[in-house]
Amino acid sequence: MQPFRLFLPESFEEAIQLMKEHGAKPISGGTAVTTLIKEKIFQPTTMVNLRKLEKDHSYIVEENGQIKIGALTTLRDIETSEIVKRNHPVVSNCLSKIASIRIRNVATIGGNLAHADPDLDLPPVLAGLDAHIDIIGEDGERSMDIKEFIQGYYETDLKEGELIKSIKIPIMPDRKGIYLKHRSLSEADWPCVGVAAFVDEAPGSVPVVFINSVADTPIMKVEGIQEMFSEGITTEAIDKVGELAADQCEPIGDARGSVWYKRKMAGAFTIRALREITGVGESLI
Ligand SMILES: Cc1cc2nc3c(=O)[nH]c(=O)nc-3n(C[C@H](O)[C@H](O)[C@H](O)COP(=O)(O)OP(=O)(O)OC[C@H]3O[C@@H](n4cnc5c(N)ncnc54)[C@H](O)[C@@H]3O)c2cc1C
């Protein structure tokens, strides 16, 4: 690893200034960045470490009908938070399936979402909960839906010099969700396919499904569900949504499964998730 200069700012404003002055990228938990550095995919000369911002920006609070999470909060703190467990157990459950406790103790939610790896577990769950990302930059602050924030293969809407400051998840007692992660290699592995499905308890509400690891973003939305359920939610209609999911994916074949296998799994896990959240048909999990 080639040596690089590391700055340790005390505030977002100072970090943004340093990033601009040195053309440097930020580092939070470092679990993704250091892997890229070790593999020589990324060879920085300068980096801006956000760790000292932890004292002010590692928090989970309930505020104005939302859960607000500071960007420097670790995945493990979110997973074990009583606020998160009480309001959105699907988030705690999803986080408990990411990597290992050692990684989750260090990785931050800001670093996780900025990384935008198509295999990430959390984004499809946050998409189903209409989460918003708060961004801070030289020109002030802005907020956007996670579905627009993650734009493609390791690509987000973050402009040069901008940082994730916090994440907001609306509290929706009527929204039920599930995240099913299929690991084909080992218990602590990345997903082969992960399916997040959500439905509101209101009569006539139509489920939404987001899938990771099968497209260039971790938030592939299954389109056409409304039409499939136009005459009600039945096991036959759920099977058809499974077929839609399999058809719409564009996975890359790798050690976790061939293109054919990943499509099959996307379909099968969509059916399992939909049966579970709608209560239609026997449970398959
Ligand atoms: C062995 C291993 C196994 C893993 N398994 C899984 C898995 O099963 N499922 C899964 O979902 N993930 C998995 N991960 C990925 C892990 O979730 C991410 O590495 C982690 O969440 C990134 O957070 P971090 O704080 O360490 O980010 P960093 O490595 O510090 O940064 C990641 C990226 O975000 C940028 N960044 C950091 N903070 C900010 C900020 N506040 N604003 C803007 N940009 C920022 C950095 O410049 C960099 O581009 C695994 C990682 C490892 C190392």
Image: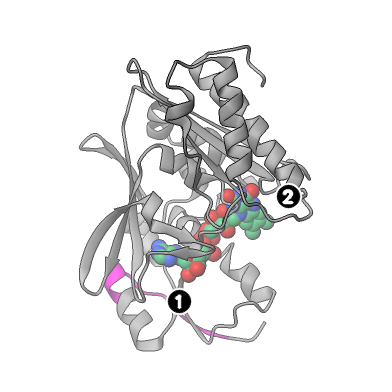
In percent of width and height, residue 145 lies at 33, 50
What secondary structure is found at the residue carrying circle 2?
A: helix
**Position of 27 compared to 21: left or right?**
right
**Residue visible at 71% across and 47% down in the picture:** 189
**Position of 277 compared to 284: left or right?**
left
Tell me if residue 223 can be seen.
Answer: yes
Cα gap from disc 1 to disc 2, whole angstroms: 34 Å
Q: Quadrant of the C terminus?
A: top right
Tell me if residue 29 can be seen.
Answer: no
User: On screen, 146 above or below 161?
Assistant: above
**Residue visible at 67% across and 30% down in the picture:** 268
Using the image, tell me which numbered label, if any, was put on residue 189: none
**Residue visible at 41% across and 68% down in the picture:** 50
Q: Is the CB of the residue bearing disc 1 within 8 angstroms of ligand 1?
A: yes
Q: Magenta stretch containing residue 5, yes or no?
A: yes
In percent of width and height, residue 182 lies at 68, 38
Q: How is the image coloured?
A: one colour
What secondary structure is found at the residue carrying circle 1?
A: strand
The amino acid beneath tag 2 is: Val
Quadrant hosting ligand 1: bottom right
**260 or 174, which lies in front?**
260
Q: Which residues are magenta?
A: 4-14
Label 1 sits on residue: 25
User: On screen, 185 above or below 7?
Assistant: above
Q: Quadrant of the N terminus?
A: bottom right
**22 or 144, which lies in front?**
144
In percent of width and height, residue 92 lies at 50, 35
**Residue visible at 37% across and 80% down in the picture:** 19
The amino acid beneath tag 1 is: Lys
Label 2 sits on residue: 259
In percent of width and height, residue 169 lies at 34, 41
